[in-house]
Image (cartoon, grey):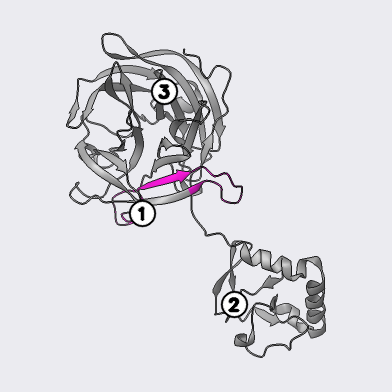
Amino acid sequence: MLWVSCGGVIGRRARRRFNGIPTAADRSDFVLLPRPSTVVPRALSDCDSSCLMLPRPLQSSRVASMAIAWLLVWSPLGSPGHWQRSAAFEPDVKYQLDLSGLAWIGGDEFLAVHDSKNNPRSRDWPRVSVLNLSHSGYEGVVWRHMGIDFTGRGGVSSDLESVCRLPGGRGFLICESGQEIGAEARIFHVTRGRESIEIRSHVQWPEKITNVEASEVCEVAGDLVFVYAERAESEGSTWIRWAKLSVDPWHFGEFSAALYKGRGRVAREGRPIAAMEIDDEGAIYIASTNDPGDNGPFRSVIWRIGRMVNRDGPTVQLGDAQQIARLDGVKVESLTLRTSADGDRDLYFGSDDEHFGGILRRLPRPPAFMKQP
């Protein structure tokens, strides 16, 4: 292989990038050859950005090495313009974290939470991010970590798994799952600041929970309604529970429940409900997912399972489940609806693919997408 030096002194085991890919360069493994108009540098400090770096084995024949250098210089790949473009293409390396919870902010922006635990290993890991859809193939989805101060809130969050957008622009709820912390799990009311997420207030979960990955807030007859479901790993079914909600001050009404029986093998062997979204007309969308381990392979199915209606108060009305999408290879843990500038609604999902990170994607709109079950 042939490499281009990045200019300056090449330190021992210095990390280098070629076309944005990190590599390791060791002065014992490479020799630096200049373009033919200069002499061979005797020391690494003699090298500048015009040098070519060749693997040590090629030094056995100086003539062969110089010939290769000449070919590179005068071939299209060796043209100065080519190397200048390669050097310029050095995007920052960023890691797409898990998208355990997701809510549309507005425009091209989404609020996401990550399932970092409150333990020594992940205490300082990101908790909340803002994602921006890109209109450039170079950038892709743009991810930005947002600071959040848990001081005086009972300590840093542990296993945030869902985000609920409050109707009317009143902010968001971000919810701990209850995994490992049980009754200490909290729900935070937050708003988006310029460079951080501001916690307005928080409350303990109003009911005893085990591991909740799906929660949502909708509006029925002018009242906020909080809806959630346990992920119910390998149980094949789970209870959807809901109650009227007030955030300022905090108050939960009496909870009601409806049993959801998972559809298909993914729900029976995995998690019947790992994500939830409710649209303005009350249609309920959920994701069932199968997580065999940190390296997968994952499988997910997205369904529309019923509606939230007003029957002497908010009521979950389950109907014949309609499959929206089947996704092999990803573990969907978040759903959100986005309204485009022309008024079209699209369903987006976020995944938590463990060792593979996570992705944000828009789903195709099936013909029956806008019809109510």
Q: Label 1 neighbourhood size at 10 Å, few (<14), some (14-19), many (20+)?
A: few
Label 3 secondary element: loop
- The residue indicated by pointer 2 is 26
Amino acid at dot 3: Asp
Q: Nearer the viewer's eye, disc 2 or disc 1?
A: 1
Residue kind at label 1, given as amino acid type: Trp
Residue 269: x and y, percent? 45, 28
Q: Which quadrant is the N terminus positioned in?
A: bottom right
**Circle 1 sits in a helix, a strand or a loop, which is it?**
loop
Q: Position of residue 112 (x, y in %)?
A: 40, 42
Residue 292 seen in the current view: no
Q: Residue at x 19, y 32 (%)?
A: 248
Q: Residue at x 75, y 80 (%)?
A: 35
Sequence-wise first label, 2 or 1: 2
Q: Secondary structure at mark 2?
A: loop
The question of residue 135 being in magenta is answered with yes
Tell me if 100 is positioned left or right of 75 in this view.
left
Looking at the image, the residue that sits furthest to the top is 312
Q: Which residue is mark 1?
A: 125
Residue 299 marker: none
Look at label 2 and name its amino acid.
Answer: Asp
